[in-house]
């Protein structure tokens, strides 16, 4: 029974090492890490080889070991393919996903008018809810929100307010709340 627990614990460690290795490779491919994690990959491969060459009697543990070996092999194939693309210069790093920019100058997000954002969200909500009839015009929504702002200012005072689109009972509605 102690051998079974030891094998299960080791397999759990190998599984965690594979998860950590996946994270390291994703960071490398995104450009966060500068070097490929070769040593951790070799260490995981060596641990798995020891298990593959070992005779495991318990069926569930043998299955878990084979599954981990297959998963590691799949990841290795994927990593090798990406590395080959990098060497050939055909891999485009997903820098935006990593939260970094490839250019040294800061890139500013386009300034979006809050009224336009609310209008776009309203149109999308109408499409999602399959609301019949023509869409309201942008100017109608803008003037409605401006009129509501005055009424809301009486309720909330000088506090900033924001509009958001919600769906209630299958119908899109514009809600307002005070900013904190």
Image (cartoon, rainbow, N blue to C red):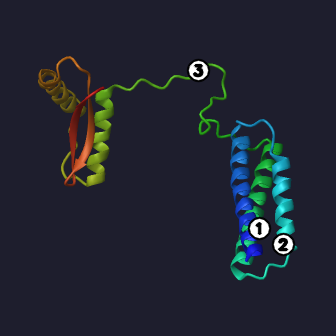
Classify 10 Å Cα crowding around label 3: few (below 14), some (14-19), many (20 and above).
Answer: few
Q: Which mark is residue 7?
A: none
Location of residue 75 (image quadrant): bottom right
Q: Which mark is residue 52?
A: 2
Mark 1 secondary-structure assignment: helix
Q: In this rendering, would 60 be left or right of 52?
A: left
Q: CA distance from mark 2 to mark 3?
A: 50 Å
- In x, y percent, where is residue 23? 68, 48
Q: Nearer the viewer, residue 115 or 178?
A: 178
Answer yes or no: do the residues labelled 1 and 2 have beta carbons within 8 Å?
A: yes
Give the residue displayed 27% in from the left and 40% down from the top: 165
Instruction: Name the quadrant of the N terminus.
Output: bottom right
Q: Mark 1 or mark 2, which has the lower sequence index?
A: 2
Give the residue displayed 29% in from the left and 26% down from the top: 179
- In x, y percent, where is residue 140? 18, 31
Q: CA distance from mark 3 to mark 1?
A: 44 Å
Camera-side mark, 3 or 1 = 1
Q: Which mark is residue 106?
A: 3
Q: Which mark is residue 69?
A: 1
Location of residue 6 (image quadrant): bottom right
Q: CA distance from mark 1 to mark 2?
A: 8 Å
């Amino acid at each position: 029974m102690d051998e079974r627990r030891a094998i299960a614990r080791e397999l759990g460690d190998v599984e965690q090492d594979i998860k950590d290795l996946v994270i390291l490779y994703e960071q490398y491919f995104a450009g966060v890490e500068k070097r490929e994690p070769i040593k951790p990959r070799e260490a995981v491969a060596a641990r798995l080889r020891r298990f593959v060459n070992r005779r495991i009697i318990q069926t569930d543990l043998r299955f878990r070991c084979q599954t981990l070996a297959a998963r590691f092999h799949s990841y290795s194939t994927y990593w090798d393919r990406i590395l080959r693309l990098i060497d050939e210069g055909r891999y485009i790093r997903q820098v935006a996903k990593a939260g970094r920019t490839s250019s040294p100058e800061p890139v500013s997000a386009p300034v979006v008018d809050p009224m336009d954002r609310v209008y776009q969200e309203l149109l999308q909500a109408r499409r999602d809810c399959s609301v019949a009839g023509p869409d309201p015009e942008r100017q109608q929504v803008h003037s409605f929100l401006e009129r509501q702002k005055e009424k809301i200012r009486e309720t909330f005072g000088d506090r900033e307010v924001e509009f958001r689109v919600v769906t209630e009972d299958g119908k899109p509605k514009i809600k307002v709340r005070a900013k904190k």
